[in-house]
């Protein structure tokens, strides 16, 4: 028996309401996903955490580190302070790893913040490792997250005062560090073993390169409505700084502190304050800039008694 017009109408109405419910559910899921703001923190150390605490209330922190135990330890501290945190492993010197981190962040929500605080110091690594992690790795992060950062988003990269103690490069070298495609970056003539004297020189070149790279990337990020800056801290008391103070360059670090205008080392919270300014609404007119905060060490190096 053929269904009546009334029956067909009822069946079509039920189907229509069913489809509308599915669409509504999908729409609600889509809206909920886009309402989640994600702050990506790369490097589970004290500085990254200090900035994250100031900019992540009500947002989701994706905390990534090379070592899962480091990420888990930092996540526990932040979770117990009331933040929503998930973790990931990332090798910043590996494109596939950085790309996977960006994809994971996108799967959680809208990426409105990037804090890149991972790296190695002169006392921890060889020149080649420093260049690969601190210079090439930063270029990868800026590129991959520059592709997915949300409009209105902001990022900070932790550079170093060391980049300010490197003598001036040529305009051509500056441009090469700023704009050479990431995969060709380590092939630049000024970064070859016969040109890079030691680990400190590699570190200085990397950190100078970070600030130059951020200036260039600010143009691309700006087209997405986002901002990116660097902070160049001086001696900040972190485990990494303690490695330096107890290493072969420890005496030199102590001389820097003594000769500086402030006369002391800094704290992660002080860097966190600058990071919060740069990532927040009060810093909305700041992008492509580098903020040197070293207690006057660089001033003493160039014009004082260092």
Image: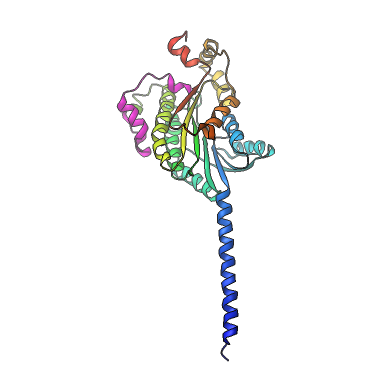
Name the residue furthest top: 305
Compared with 2, 143 (above or below) is: above
In-front residue for pair 270/124: 270
Instruction: Find out whether residue 209 is within the magenta segment.
Output: no
Give the residue displayed 59% in from the left and 53% down from the top. 32
Residue 259, position as x, y percentages in the image = 52, 10
Residue 221 image-quadrant placement: top left
In-front residue for pair 13/91: 13
Give the residue displayed 55% in from the left and 11% down from the top. 258
Compared with 196, 83 (above or below) is: below
Name the residue furthest bottom: 1
In the rendered structure, the answer to whether residue 190 lies left or right of residue 115 reads: left
In-front residue for pair 252/126: 252
Compared with 11, 236 (above or below) is: above
Q: How many marks?
A: 0
Rendered image coloring scheme: rainbow
In the rendered structure, the answer to whether residue 275 lies left or right of residue 219 reads: right
In-front residue for pair 225/266: 225
Name the residue furthest right: 80
Question: How would you classify the magenta stretch by its main secondary structure?
Answer: helix
Instruction: Find out whether residue 170 is within the magenta segment.
Output: yes
Quadrant placement of the N terminus: bottom right
Q: Which residues are magenta?
A: 160-189
Residue 136 image-quadrant placement: top left
Residue 67, position as x, y percentages in the image = 57, 38
Residue 143 image-quadrant placement: top left
Residue 148, position as x, y percentages in the image = 46, 45
Asked whether residue 31 is in view, the answer is: yes
Asked whether residue 246 is in view, the answer is: no
Give the residue displayed 68% in from the left and 36% down from the top. 81
Residue 238, position as x, y percentages in the image = 58, 25
């Amino acid at each position: 028996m053929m269904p009546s017009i009334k029956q067909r109408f009822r069946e079509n109405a039920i189907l229509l309401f069913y489809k509308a419910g599915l669409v509504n559910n999908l729409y609600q899921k889509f809206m909920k996903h886009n309402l989640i703001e994600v702050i990506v923190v790369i490097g589970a150390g004290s500085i990254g955490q200090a900035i994250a605490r100031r900019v992540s209330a009500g947002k989701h922190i994706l905390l990534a580190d090379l070592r899962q135990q480091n990420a888990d330890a930092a996540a526990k501290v932040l979770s117990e302070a009331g933040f929503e945190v998930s973790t990931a492993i990332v090798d910043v010197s590996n494109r596939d790893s950085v790309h996977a981190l960006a994809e994971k962040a996108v799967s959680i929500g809208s990426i409105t913040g990037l804090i890149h605080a991972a790296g190695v110091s002169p006392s921890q690594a060889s020149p080649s490792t420093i260049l690969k992690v601190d210079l090439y790795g930063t270029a990868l992060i800026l590129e991959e997250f520059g592709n997915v950062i949300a409009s209105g988003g902001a990022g900070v990269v932790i550079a170093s005062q060391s980049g300010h103690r490197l003598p001036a490069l040529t305009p051509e070298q500056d441009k090469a560090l700023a704009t050479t495609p990431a995969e060709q970056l380590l092939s630049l003539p000024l970064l070859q073993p016969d040109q890079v004297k030691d680990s400190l020189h590699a570190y200085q070149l990397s950190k100078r390169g970070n600030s130059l790279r951020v200036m260039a990337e600010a143009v691309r990020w700006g087209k997405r409505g986002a901002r990116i800056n660097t902070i160049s801290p001086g001696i900040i008391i972190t485990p990494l700084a303690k490695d330096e103070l107890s290493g072969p360059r420890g005496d030199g670090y102590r001389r820097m502190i003594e000769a500086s205008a402030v006369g002391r080392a800094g704290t992660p919270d002080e860097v966190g304050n600058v990071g919060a300014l740069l990532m927040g609404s009060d810093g909305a007119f700041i992008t492509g800039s580098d903020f040197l905060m070293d207690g006057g060490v660089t001033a003493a190096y160039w014009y004082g008694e260092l």
